[in-house]
Amino acid sequence: MVGIVIISHGDLAPGLLQAGSMVFGDQPSVGACSLTPDMGPDDIRAQIEGTIQGFEDPENVVILADLWGGTPFNQASAVLDGHQDTWAIVTGVNLPMLIEAYTLRMDASKSAHDIASQLVATGREGVRVKPESLDHTKAAQPTGAKPAAADLKNVAGGGRIKFVLCRIDTRLLHGQVATTWTKMTKPDRIIVVSDAVAHDELRKSMIEQAAPPGVRAHVIPINKLIAVSKDPRFGATRAMLLFETPQDLLRAVKGGVEIKEVNLGSIAHSTGKVVVTNAVAVDEADVACLEELADMGIKFDVRKVPADASISLANIMKKAKAELAGRVKE
């Protein structure tokens, strides 16, 4: 696996490392090196060298630096000397770039040079502004024109729409989904399926704007998904489905949406629910719904991000029942 070193002035590098873990999960062969005011050039160089030596494969390394020409970059360049054939440095590091590096190195065939060559575009794509009118790098729209609203329009194709991921997540489209899961499953559309959100213009707008570059996001009611799933005109579509609750998912499945596997990402805690994992809390209704879905032959992958180990649904259902029963006795 390609090793990754994040280097910066101050606490930027460890901060990015922590943020990357929140989005993608903890990663092996990754380290952060910081230049603090009390350190000299030799100190940061020693940090970089020591970090690389601790990697599984110290001969295949990408160094992500904050600033071209800064001391961390200059010392990394000195360390790079003699390793140009297998190491690379990319500057201007940001979180989208780091997540892309994590994703790319999951392909064992990719070298450090392969990864570095793709990171520059990702880093640039991650720089956006709101209002979008402030982005003068894009062609100005005619006066009075409004951006086209994201709508699930017919696309060419035959057969049925392909669901590359079906996920239950109270937060719906957020950082872990927009980056990690999208990169893993490569959808061309993200479809949030919720009657409530479809009629909430503010939430709907925020979700549509949260879509990562190159992927359109749509918010539709459950009945529309049922119709779309049976329409052969959507056969060329690769879609990620996001449900807010297991109850919404069950309605879709009973309506004829063919789903074989579900990623249970999170169910938020609220009054009456018991916590069964660090991201999932359930009550009696949730337990009954999840078990009904499992009895219908649907497989569950319980984890927040791809790097997490999958947890058995049967085990967390057993834990939930025990805790719910114990609470009733009290």
Image (cartoon, helix red, strand yellow):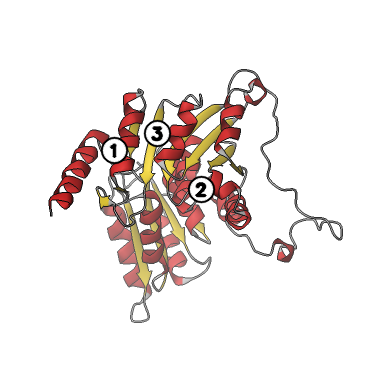
Res. 105 visible in picture? no
- Residue matched to label 3: 262
Foreground pick, 81 / 216? 216
The location of residue 315, given as percent across then percent down, is 20, 37
Under circle 1, the secondary element is loop
Indicate left or right for 233 with 20 as reference: right
Amino acid type of disc 1?
A: Ser
Q: Residue at x 60, y 59 (%)?
A: 127
Q: CA distance from mark 3 to mark 1?
A: 12 Å
Q: Which picture quadrant has residue 150? A: top right
**Marks 3, 1: nearer the viewer:** 3
Q: Position of residue 239 (x, y in %)?
A: 55, 34
Q: Is residue 319 above or below residue 293?
A: below
Amino acid type, label 3 = Val
Q: Residue furthest bottom?
A: 38
The mark nearer the N terminus, 2 or 1, is 2
Circles 3 and 2, Cβ within 8 Å, touching? The answer is no
Which residue is depicted at the point 51% across and 27% down?
A: 255
Nearest to N terminus: mark 3 or mark 1 = 3
Q: Which residue is mark 2?
A: 178
Q: Earlier in the sequence, mark 3 or mark 2?
A: 2
Circle 1 is placed at which residue position?
310
